[in-house]
Image (cartoon, rainbow, N blue to C red):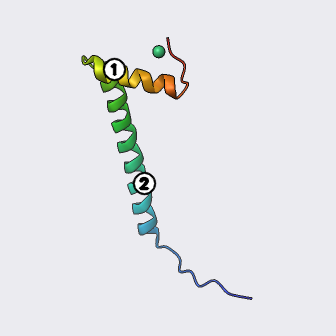
Amino acid sequence: MTSSTTTPIPDDQRVSATRSLLLQLCAGAVLGLVVLYGVAFAESPIAHNAAHDVRHVTVKPCH
Ligand SMILES: [Zn+2]
């Protein structure tokens, strides 16, 4: 039988890691929304059509 030799993570490091994870998730969500709405309402028909084609390729509801 083997014994586990893990050391407990201090609370301050655990809180810091949790904050870092939440910050990364929020930054990713904001970036995704900016890209999504930036492309959806873009004046350039190339960016809009490319995003539209991706919707059709990924079988998302459209029209
Ligand atoms: Zn469409």
> Residue under circle 2?
21
Residue at 42% x, 61% y is 17
Q: Quadrant of residue 34?
A: top left
| Residue 49 percent coordinates (x, y) | 36, 19
Q: Secondary structure at mark 1?
A: helix
In the displayed structure image, the side of residue 58 where residue 1 appears, left or right? right
Residue 61, x across and y down, in percent: 54, 19
Check disc 1 and give the amino acid type.
His
Which mark lies nearer to you, 1 or 2? 1
Disc 1 C-beta below 8 A from ligand 1: no
| Residue denoted by label 1 | 48
Label 2 crowd bin: few (<14), some (14–19), many (20+), radius 10 Å: few
Q: Residue at x 38, y 35 (%)?
A: 32
* Residue shown at the point (37%, 31%) measured from the top left: 33
Q: Alpha-carbon distance for marks 1 and 2? A: 32 Å
Q: Nearer the viewer, residue 61 or 23?
A: 61
